[in-house]
Amino acid sequence: MRIAVIGSGSVGEGLARAWSALGHSVVIGSRSPESERMVSLVAEIGNGVEAAGLSASVTGADVIVLAVPWGAVEQSISRLGDVSGRVLIDATNPIARGLKLDVGHTSSGGERVAEWAVGARVVKALNIVDARLLDGRKLDGREISIPICGHDADAKRVVIALIAELGFDVVDAGGLDSSRLLEPLTLLMIRLSMKKSLGNEIGFRVLRE
Ligand SMILES: NC(=O)c1ccc[n+]([C@@H]2O[C@H](COP(=O)([O-])OP(=O)(O)OC[C@H]3O[C@@H](n4cnc5c(N)ncnc54)[C@H](OP(=O)(O)O)[C@@H]3O)[C@@H](O)[C@H]2O)c1
């Protein structure tokens, strides 16, 4: 599968590394694809990973993943060009200064993304897992659960398969409005990780028979 990961930070790099190692064709969409940092990053990851500008990166991509800071989301989407009909994973969190949600309760970052990425088939996913765990390692002998949500069943099928390949337990949490529930969970994770000193090797698991 051809995957365009938008953003070359912790999440973008982690996903590029993990999916390319599984044989997917990954391009990192960056504001500066020709910078020294990007050239050495893609060389270091290897596995055929490429870097490109934002609009070039999504050409021919089966799946687009947004992995940029919340303040850059709307502008990054506008720089992708026409994304109608495309499967778009929103891995971002609408976190504002002071570790507060910029939007919540009656809307969500995921729903805003769907408004900005006109016609895209948006799936909220991967926003809760720490980027350092994107290699899909198990915790306490179990896979970490990754809740996902979105309105398009076919898009969700594609995303569920891609995330399961990384070694996660994927849980379908319903329509895109469930982003209102998934985004605050990130703040809980950050609080547990930093303020309660549980470290970064923590994750959620949905237990079921
Ligand atoms: N870190 C985590 O553990 C984690 C886990 C799950 C979800 N998330 C969410 O995923 C998103 C990305 O997180 P991250 O930790 O990967 O962020 P990051 O390390 O700060 O990287 C974000 C990347 O976005 C690109 N970008 C585009 N516009 C930008 C701007 N105005 N300012 C800064 N960077 C800009 C940059 O790549 P270029 O310079 O190449 O354009 C940058 O490397 C966030 O919304 C975050 O809440 C993070």
Image: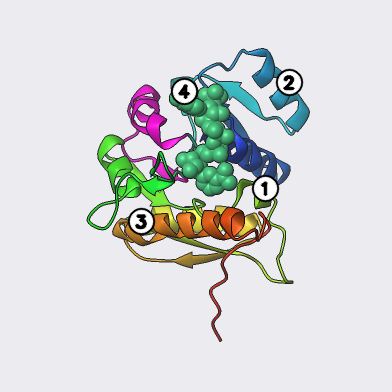
Q: Is residue 8 magenta?
A: no
Instruction: Indicate if the residue with disc 1 has its beta carbon within 8 Å of ligand 1.
Output: yes
Residue at mark 1: 132
Q: Seen in the image, is 17 located left or right of residue 103?
A: right
Residue at mark 2: 40
Three-letter amino acid code of the residue under disc 1: Arg
Q: Nearer the viewer, mark 1 or mark 4?
A: 1
The answer to whether one can see residue 64 in this image is no
The answer to whether one can see residue 104 in this image is yes
Residue at mark 3: 179
Does 59 appear above or below 183? above
Q: CA distance from mark 3 to mark 1?
A: 22 Å
Mark nearer the N terminus (3 vs 1): 1
Three-letter amino acid code of the residue under disc 2: Ser
Could you classify mark 4 by the number of other residues whose Cα lies within 10 Å: few (under 14), some (14-19), or many (20 or more)?
Answer: many
What residue is rendered at 38% in x and 48% in y? 100
Q: Are marks 3 and 1 in contact (CB under 8 Å)?
A: no
Dot 2: what SS? helix
Residue at mark 4: 54
Q: Nearer the viewer, mark 2 or mark 1?
A: 1
Does 128 appear above or below 64? below
